[in-house]
Amino acid sequence: MDASPAPAAAPGSSGDPRGGTATVDTPLLSLRGVTKRFGAVQALTDVDLDVPAGMVTALAGDNGAGKSVTIKTISGLWRPDEGEILWNGQVVDIANPDDAADLGITTVYQDLALCDNLDIVQNMFLGHELLRGRALDEDTMEKRARATLADLSVTTVRSVRQPVASLSGGQRQSVAVAKAVMANSKLVILDEPTAALGVAQTRMVLDLVRRLADRGVAVLLISHNLNDVFAVADRVAVLYLGRMVVEAPLSDFDTQSVVDYMTIGRSERATPDRRAAPNGAGSAADRPPTGEGAK
Ligand SMILES: Nc1ncnc2c1ncn2[C@@H]1O[C@H](COP(=O)(O)OP(=O)(O)O)[C@@H](O)[C@H]1O
Ligand SMILES: [Mg+2]
């Protein structure tokens, strides 16, 4: 009965009714021709980006390159002036953060948005508290919080009843990621998650990022730390002055080529990439027609 000719390694069950287009070839999220201006500042120009499920896509770029504007656009804080966002290949309008959350997008910003005075369980269920009758179901929430952390191999937290203020930076990142996991996120965006961390904590968070992708989540990791990129990414996309100058599998890069793309927007070292073509004209075959005529 499973007439699917798909040769790819997708471990999907043969009877999945949604198995058609949205698994192997179609990224969970794509940006197509996204442009964003702030007055005279052109923050993003014609940006394409694919973020597939089950992979870590690193979004790199120097300060001011447009990384934050890109993730704020995906997260519903900004709307593109031009271009479109596709979710499983369908054009979607992410008008506000609620729209993003409804799709299953969770963004862990650098300041983490955890409440210091609340404990781990309270933070993980903030806004989604479980009730038993009219009272909070503390037991179940505590069990689920503990199970999620254990499932993600977060083992250094002594008690889920510790206030978040007492945690280390790495533990805080872990709690923020676990919260995203518990919300059943399909896409998790992490903005420089290791920026404030020491070596061991960085290792812990990167391991967690890897496990998240291995569970089938699409991860978009914002970083200008090349060690992080090479430790954990499957794919690398580099923004330079608001333009996407390269997007390719990690194996196409070495550290020097990533540095080249970040600092001068091109590299002689890497194999030429379709996205490096001037004004992204590329081969029309590998991008869907976007009503891009109006310029
Ligand atoms: N709210 C804003 N108003 C005006 N300009 C902005 C705003 N946010 C970002 N920019 C500009 O957009 C460009 C990209 O910024 P950003 O995405 O924050 O870079 P980064 O890659 O460092 O995260 C920069 O030139 C920045 O000054
Ligand atoms: Mg930024």
Image (cartoon, rainbow, N blue to C red):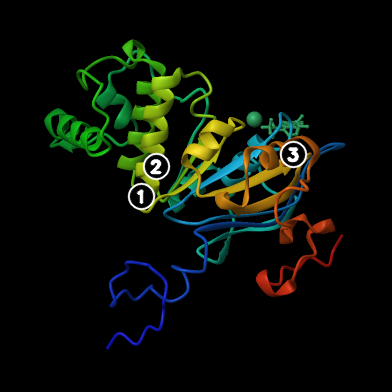
- The reply to whether residue 191 is visible in this rendering is no
Q: Residue 286: horizontal and vertical position, in percent?
A: 66, 70
- Of circles 2 and 3, the one toward us is 3
- Judging depth in this view, the residue of 212 and 227 nearest the camera is 227
Q: Residue 237: where, in percent of width, then height? A: 63, 47
Q: Nearer the viewer, mark 3 or mark 1?
A: 3
Kind of element beneath mark 3: helix
Residue 210 numbered tag: 2
Contact, mark 1 vs mark 2 (Cβ under 8 Å): yes
Q: Position of residue 125 (x, y in %)?
A: 29, 32
Residue located 13% across and 36% down the image = 132
Given the image, on which type of amino acid does mark 1 rest? Asp
The answer to whether mark 1 is within 8 Å of ligand 2 is no
Residue hosting label 1: 214
Residue occupying the point 68% across, 38% down: 256
Q: Which mark is residue 260?
A: 3
